[in-house]
Amino acid sequence: MLDLTAGCCQFSVKPADIDANLKTVECALSELADRNCRLAVLPEMWSCSFPYPVLPAMAQRTPEVIERIGKIAREKGMVIVGSLPEAEGETLYNTSYVIDADGKTSGTYRKVHLFSLHREHENFGRGTTAGVFDTSIGKIGVMICYDLRFPELARKMALEGAEILCVSALWPLVRIKHWSVLLRARAVENQLFVAAANGCGFGEKIVWGGGSALVSPLGEVLIGAGRSDENISADFKARDLLEFRKLIPCFDDRFPSAY
């Protein structure tokens, strides 16, 4: 992992309005680039939110969205991570794209844990594999929103070498305390950095919670966002990760046969 400045773009995602959301993200990425960020994380389904009746049409524009974001990544020398609707045949997936600083897609991760309370399992196909990707800044693990409640997934990614965990979410205000606790827990138990971007503002019959955060391997919130549109950034230093793993060698002390 390289020393780097990481950032999160928190904003109110406008349902089914790809052009407006793209404009917001392009401005946010430009601001983060001015802060010398080499990593930027975007919210879940940041191009359109969850307008299920028109989601297939939204997914058809995802290749265009990826192309535009790839151009920014290449121009700014930035790794960009965020989830978008992906269509494969007649199946839709909630997919996080990892776009490297050369503008190319380093990998994609399809959301494994579908939020049944909001009937996601009726509208999306399920991903089946964890996502750890080699990038120009180091190994990145990817989670999407509800995935955060499943420590097994984060641990698998840590064991596969993830040094930074990128989380894209549309997490509601009513459960925002859970979000904050789980971000710190995933960082501490896996001794890695967490960069988590949440949405804010109002969805259909829901208020998104904001609270995007950049968290150290020690569980320290380096910077956290409030409840409105905000771009946050903080420094991730490789020595903080390495020194904590050396001080408390959790991975060496594991005893998998007991669990």
Image (tube, grey):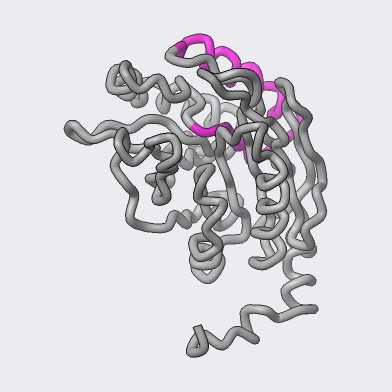
Check residue 34 for magenta coloring. Answer: yes
Foreground of the two, 113 or 17: 113
- The picture places residue 109, in percent across and down from the top left corner, at 41, 47
Q: Quadrant of residue 220?
A: bottom right
Q: Residue at x 53, y 71 (%)?
A: 159
Q: Residue at x 53, y 42 (%)?
A: 145
Residue 26, can we see it?
no
In this rendering, would 101 be left or right of 115?
A: right
Helix, strand or loop for the magenta stretch, by majority = helix
Check residue 1 for magenta coloring. Answer: no
- The picture places residue 146, in percent across and down from the top left corner, at 51, 46
Relative vertical location of residue 192 with respect to residue 110 in this rendering, above or below: below
In this rendering, would 230 be left or right of 106?
A: right
In this rendering, would 220 be left or right of 196?
A: right
- The picture places residue 19, in percent across and down from the top left corner, at 47, 10
Residue 67, can we see it?
yes
Foreground of the two, 144 or 245: 144
